[in-house]
Amino acid sequence: MKRAIIVHGWSDTPEGSWFPWLKRKLEEKGFRVDVPEMPDTNIPKIDAWVKKLEETIGKPDKDTFLVGHSIGCQAIMRYLEKANAKVGGILFVAGWFTLKGLGKEEQIVVKPWLETQINTDQVRNSAGKTIAIFCDNDPYVPITNAETFKKRLGCETITVTGKGHFTAEDGVTELPEALEAVLKLSR
C-alpha cells in the first residue's frame, strides 16, 4: 500500500493550512496518510523533528512518499541524509536553503537550520523522484531556492502565482498542485 507522510511547517499543525485537504484527497486515492504533530512547532529543533520522522516513518520503502512544507522540507532532508534507506519520492512545498523577511526572534530559531549543512548528495540518493513547488510572492522563501532545489536535489520545480507561503493565513486551504505532484511521484 502506498503511504504518504505530510510534515507541516513551523508554527503550524496537522489540522492547519492545506494538510487535512491533501490527507483526505490522498486517502480517497488509496494512500495511507500520516500527518504527525511535530514537536515544539513554535521553536523547532533539528534533532527533535528528525526523531519524530524516524518514529512516524518506521521502515521506508519505494511506496513511501514524503511531503514537506517549509521547515518540514528541511526536516525531511535531514531525516533522509541519516536514514540510509530509499523512499518512492518527495514533494517539497516552499522548501528552502535560504530565507528572507524574518524578524530577530525568528532568525535565532532558524539559525541552526540554516547553518547546519545538509548532505544533499545523500538526500538525492535516498529520495527517489522529487518535485518542489514554489510561489512567486512567498514572503519568506526567495524564488532563487527553485534553482537550488533543481541543482542540488534534481527536483522538478513548479512555480505558482499568488499563494504566498502556502499557509491558511495566505488563504491556502487546498493545494491541487500538491495532490497532482504526489500522484505523479507515485506512478
Image (spheres, rainbow, N blue to C red):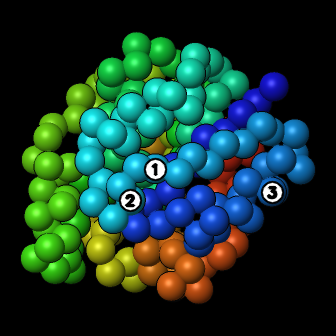
Identify the residue position indicated by label 2 in the image. Answer: 41
Of the residues shown, which amino acid type is indicated by label 1?
A: Met
Quadrant of the frame with the C terminus: top right
Which element is circle 2 on? Answer: loop
Residue ID for mark 3: 24
Q: Nearer the viewer, residue 9 or 178?
A: 9
The kind of secondary structure element at disc 3 is helix
Q: Nearer the viewer, mark 3 or mark 1?
A: 1
Q: Is residue 116 left or right of residue 49?
A: left
Task: Judge left or right: residue 53 versus residue 115.
Answer: right
Q: Mark 2, residues whose alpha carbon is within 10 Å: few (<14), some, or many (≥20)? A: some
Q: Position of residue 155 (x, y in %)?
A: 45, 43
Mark 2 vs 3, N-terminal side: 3
Labels 2 & 3 near each other (Cβ < 8 A): no
**Residue 80 at x, y = what percent?**
40, 27
Q: Which quadrant holds the N terminus?
A: top right
Residue 142 appears at what percent x and percent y? Answer: 28, 70
On the image, numbered disc 1 is attached to which residue?
38
Q: Are discs 2 and 1 less than 8 Å apart at CB? A: yes
Mark pair 2, 3: CA separation = 23 Å
Q: Give the distance between the C-alpha atoms of the residues marked 2 and 1, in whole angstroms.
A: 6 Å
Question: How many circles with numbers are drawn on the protein?
Answer: 3
Specify the quadrant of the image occupied by residue 117. Answer: top left
- Place of residue 55 in the rendered image (x, y in percent of width and height, measured from the top left): 51, 28
